[in-house]
Amino acid sequence: MTAWEPPDSRRRSLHGYHCQAKMAEEREPPPLGDVGQADFVEVEDGEDLFVSTVTTIEQLSPTTPEPSCLPAEDISTNSNGPKQEILLDDDQEDLFAEATEEVSLDSPEREPILSDGPSPAITPVTPTVIITPRAEASMFDRSLDEDEDTEENGDTFDMQITVSDPEKVGDGMNAYMAYKVTTKTSLNLFSRNEFSVKRRFSDFLGLHSKLASKYMHIGYIVPPAPEKSIVGMTKVKVGKEDLSSAEFVEKRRSALQRYLTRTVTHPALLKDPDVIQFLENTELPRAVSTQALSGAGILRMVNKAAEAVNKMTIKMNESDAWFEEKQQQFENLDIQLRKLHASVESLVCHRKELSVNTASFAKSAAMLGNSEDHTALSRALSQLAEVEEKIDQLHQEQAYADFYLFSELLGDYVRLIAAVKGVFDQRMKTWSKWQDAQLLLQRKREAETKLQYANKPDKLQQAKDEIKEWETKVQQGERDFEQISKNIRQEVGRFEKQRVKDFKVVIIKYLESLVHTQQQLIKYWEAFLPEAKAIA
Amino acid sequence: PIRHSESVPNVAVNVDLQTDATLQVDISDALSERDKVKFTVHTKSTLPNFKQNEFSVVRQHEEFIWLHDSFVENEDYAGFIIPPAPPRPDFDASREKLQKLGEGEGSMTKEEFTKMKQELEAEYLAIFKKTVAMHEVFLCRVAAHPVLRKDLNFHVFLEYNQDLSVRGKNKKEKLEDFFKNVVKSADGVIVAGVKDVDDFFEHEKTFLLEYHNRVKDASIKSDRMIRSHKSKLHIPFPHLFPHLFPHLFPHLFVRFFLKVSELFEKTRKIEARVAADEDLKLADLLKYYLRESQAAKDLLYRRGRALVDYENANKALDKARAKNKDVLQAETTQQVCCQKFEKISESAKQELIDFKTRRVAAFRKNLVELAELELKHAKGNLQLLQSCLAVLKGDT
């Protein structure tokens, strides 16, 4: 996940200092503990840890192979659930008019697509588009090398989303921030190669809400949207033009960009009409149902509570050890990530504090230099003050990097893990439904048996009909369960790969920022050294 | 209890001193017990005053203070900058942290606990070494001073191998001291207000006043900065990395994240050293010159007091002559004051010039060493980071 970058201000170049002094020979170490030579990491030659496309940071390289080469999927402009706007239907028909090829469940080359026939037993909204690329299907079977090759080939996927130019619209408590969403792409999905629209925060939430309701129950991990913040937004609304509200807006802008980039990296979500509409359409119907205190909002809260209760009462017979193992892993990961997130946030805080104290000391050293009556020492102290001031700047920049590179990524992943857990829960629900259907079927059968002896022919017929109905439902339930299980396996595989990539990229970027800091430190101290030596 | 290892160089950190063979003093060992520190003061001397050429005694902090106070109270030394007394050994903060760590042992992994314990113990050791150095500097300053080194109390301090039975001040005495200080500062203001005929001293007065205040400020701010630096290092970082990679491709990604983990461990160690070095070279330097500039101010105060006394004696003499009453007494008083004042002035001038020389030399030494250490550590860090990055990026 690399679409965001710390702003360029971080990499301000400074006046070069001319290094006159040669490095003094090794000084006697301070009388403090074992000051040995720094242990240097032995460079392992010959082994590359991974063949990766990390160097091309800007490029998104998901695991989908050339989508343009994929045969058009069967897209059904079917029953839109109650939550969707009616407008969508028309749009869908326009966009996917070319879609013709039917894909059967038995196709050896493609993964079966979820049935798009009417299936009343399942929760209302069925997905409209599913893509399961070839590579993912057999990912577990291939060796690593092959997999990487696929990635290399898959680079015709080219899409870059930027969220920029936050603008305050309106006044007072009704004011909101509008963000410019720019898409640059060569994909055929879109009518143009480059276009932008204006969106507000609730639009993003609305998009997420729609995607979640469409895809989560079949096991897709839908990237969570950035969190609401009443405090933050109120400050902006009220018009507080201070550093903290500027920081808040920037934090949100960055989060929105990451959110969109993650969403389109998901092969299925990319093709979702809601997503496409979000990116392309100038006007978007206002997503009212995302407001916390709206009717829909309250309904959501009630549903969440109900689900939580349900979760506790469902005791699933896990026949597949993989799921149990994975759930445990995600639990562990969740705990560790939260800890690390807390630590990094603490680090950001401390670094900011250090910066403040360094600046304060710099001033103090300058004053001391002023009052010193030995000329050379006075000059050296002033120089020291300057060095410390520059170091303070460095601390601030580093804190910025800590935050935007690391802390935010960790926060994103804590929320993503929650989404993953949600998907596992959905599987449990699906299983539960299937079991309930089986139970009900059994009861119907028992009822039918009873009726056979009761000589009520019309009731018997009704019972037989019901049995047929429930048999179908049971079969459907089983299919759904298998489907969601399969989807989850793929999703988890994709997620884990993406996670590793994200962290690798961020860690490398973070290390590069640390390198930069050290290089600057060296510059400053090398410039100072001759001044100190010049004291006579 | 911690012993001060003998292999550690006992160089006086903040003061550039000329030591000669006739009298060399150092602290060769120290033992930290629960609530006190015992310093082993080791002397090598060719002077006839001592029974042996080389000997050691054990002293505690209170005995150093007794020695210092005896100098301050000695009228003969009024014209000298009395070497500032070493601060009391203070392990409270460090002990508290270690205790807190012990209490919180249950809430962290064994690894984290051991690591934090090591860090805190290193901190404790650092404080210990610092207090030893500060006590040593005091003794070395005395030994280097042409007059003070001959002081009888000093010799007793060095040689008498029994306890000096110098108890700490009791409450009454502490209260007396407090009042004395109040009176002294009030007087100091009055005395400072008297304009000095001598340009040199007038300049020194103005200079020292401002300098002392600025050093104080710089000392406080540098302490704060270094404390921030250190506290940043105490943030626990869980061993997340084993959990970050998917179990599907264990070998390759493990190595990546383990390397990163290792890297952060090493850079953290270097950061700790940076903070420690800054503490020694910068913070301690400023603290020391805070104390010395105060001692210099005290000297100026004494001279100023003597000047006022002299001028008052002159006035009294004139009055006595005018009234022709108690003239002889007034004359004697005036002469005594005059002598006192002149004696102080003479030595004060030299002392203040020496003070400047010492100060400049100490700052130079420490600033140069600070810069060199910062460079060394930054380069070490850079090397670590770059080689790790090279490995992580593979062979692209």
Image: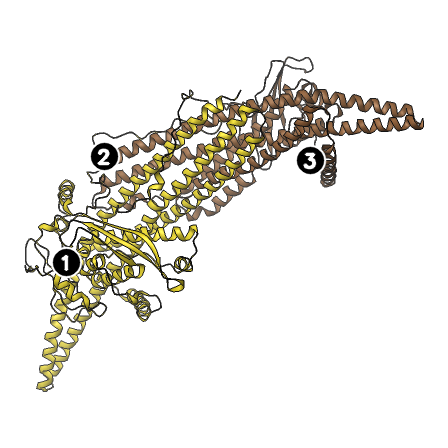
Q: Where residue B95 sits: x, y (%)?
A: 53, 40
Q: Where residue A441 sits: x, y (%)?
A: 15, 73
Q: Where residue A214 sits: x, y (%)?
A: 21, 63
- Name the one closer to the observer, A467 or B180: B180
Pointers 3 and 2 in contact (C-beta within 8 Å): no
For label 2, the SS is: loop
Q: Which chain is brown?
A: B
Q: Which residue is mark 2?
A: B394
Q: Are marks 1 and 2 on the same chain?
A: no
Q: Residue at x 39, y 26 (%)?
A: A37
Q: Which residue is mark 1?
A: A130
- Name the one closer to the observer, A73 or A15: A15
- Name the one closer to the observer, A127 or A47: A127
For chain A, what colour was chosen? yellow
Q: Earlier in the sequence, mark 3 or mark 2?
A: 3
Other-residue count near label 3 (Cα within 10 Å), few / some / many at <14 / 14–19 / ≥20: few
For label 3, the SS is: loop
Q: Residue at x 44, y 44 (%)?
A: A352
Q: How far, Cα to Cα, is label 3 from label 1?
A: 84 Å
Task: State whether residue B280 appears in this view.
Answer: no
